[in-house]
Image: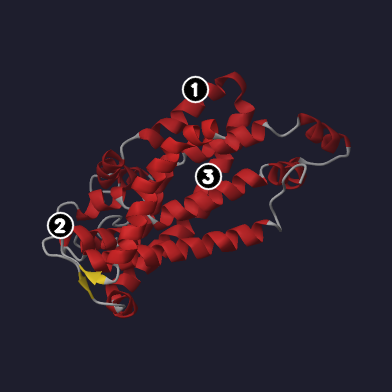
Amino acid sequence: MLAGLAFISPWFIGFLVFTAGPMIASLGLAFTEYDVLNPPKFVGLQNFQRLLTDPRLGLSLGNSIFYTVLHVPLVMMVALGLALLLNRVGKAAGFFRTAFYLPSITPAVAVGALWLWILNPRIGLINRSLALLGIVGPGWTTDPNWIKPGIVLMSLWSVGSTVILYLAALRNVPPELYEAARIDGANGWQQFRHITAPMISGTIFFTLVVNTIASLQIFTEVYTMYFGNMNSGAAASAGLFYNIYLFRQAFEFLRMGYASAMAWLLFVIIMILTVIQLRTSNRWVYYEGA
């Protein structure tokens, strides 16, 4: 008993100091007006009432939801497609697995700076490639209608970690199931639908939850691209995501109380979405032996 407690104590202490403690502190700050320079002043529910009337908050939340709706299914489909291809490559899979994963460990600031050039409407790689095909590329970084799709395109850069998870799940599907299906005359699509998809549904569900949470909290890459120099132009509205607006309220305008209230609103939204995903998972996630 004591040995078990000793082993988990580093994690437990870290959780209290770096997670639970700051969460409790932010909940307290959410009921105050605090600018770091002066002591917190209790204002009751004023910060939460302001959440309901702040048009910039609604805009940033809408941008984050729009990005999540596009990003999550696109990343999951691309990652699953690449994993299915890697599963057939054989011995060369190790090289491609490393190649796909390397972008995932690239610093987010570097990714933002790199994609700011790739998406540049005049000299960027994408529009130059489209020009070779006779297509006039859109203003990925200047047109408000194309800023969010450009950011979704950038998000595919880090698809490697999801590919690795899907590939590991595919490798665990018993080959006997495919052999039996082929004997029964099942084609490729039928094998994918009735064998592959159910057998890796647990991993699909995990990536759905994780990618949804990560999408709603996107920050570093977009902030580096559009807000680092405080002159964001067209992206001031189209690229204003929830965490960027929260960060600016806290560390640029020193409204710690309001930023804390925003953080708790995002926590509640993510918790509700996760609970919905967990409840609906019983209908489509297959757990072997359950």
Q: Using residue 71 as the reference point, say whether residue 255 is left or right of it.
A: left
- How crowded pointer 3 is (Cα within 10 Å; few <14, some 14-19, many 20+) is rated as some
Coloring applied to the structure? secondary structure
Label 1 residue SS: helix
Residue at 24 percent across and 43 percent down: it is 113
The front one of 43 and 63 is 43
Query: What element does badge 2 sit on?
Result: loop
- Residue 230's disc number: 2
Q: Label 3 sits on what residue type?
A: Val
Residue furthest top as drawn: 91
Residue occupied by mark 3: 78
Q: What residue type is labelled 1?
A: Phe
The reply to whether dot 2 and dot 1 touch (C-beta < 8 Å) is no
Residue 208 picture location, percent across and down: 55, 51
Q: Outermost residue, front direction?
A: 2
Residue at image x 40%, y 36%?
A: 104
Whether 128 is drawn above or below 209: the answer is above
Which dot marks residue 65? none
Q: Residue 218, position in %: x, y?
A: 36, 53
Mark 2: few, some, or many residues within 10 Å (few <14, many ≥20)? few
Task: Calculate the distance from the C-alpha at mark 1 to the C-alpha at mark 3.
Answer: 18 Å
Relative to 50, say whether 35 is above or below: above
**What distance separates the C-alpha of mark 2 from that of mark 1?**
41 Å
Look at the image and tell me whether residue 144 can be seen: no
According to the picture, the residue beneath numbered tag 1 turns out to be 95
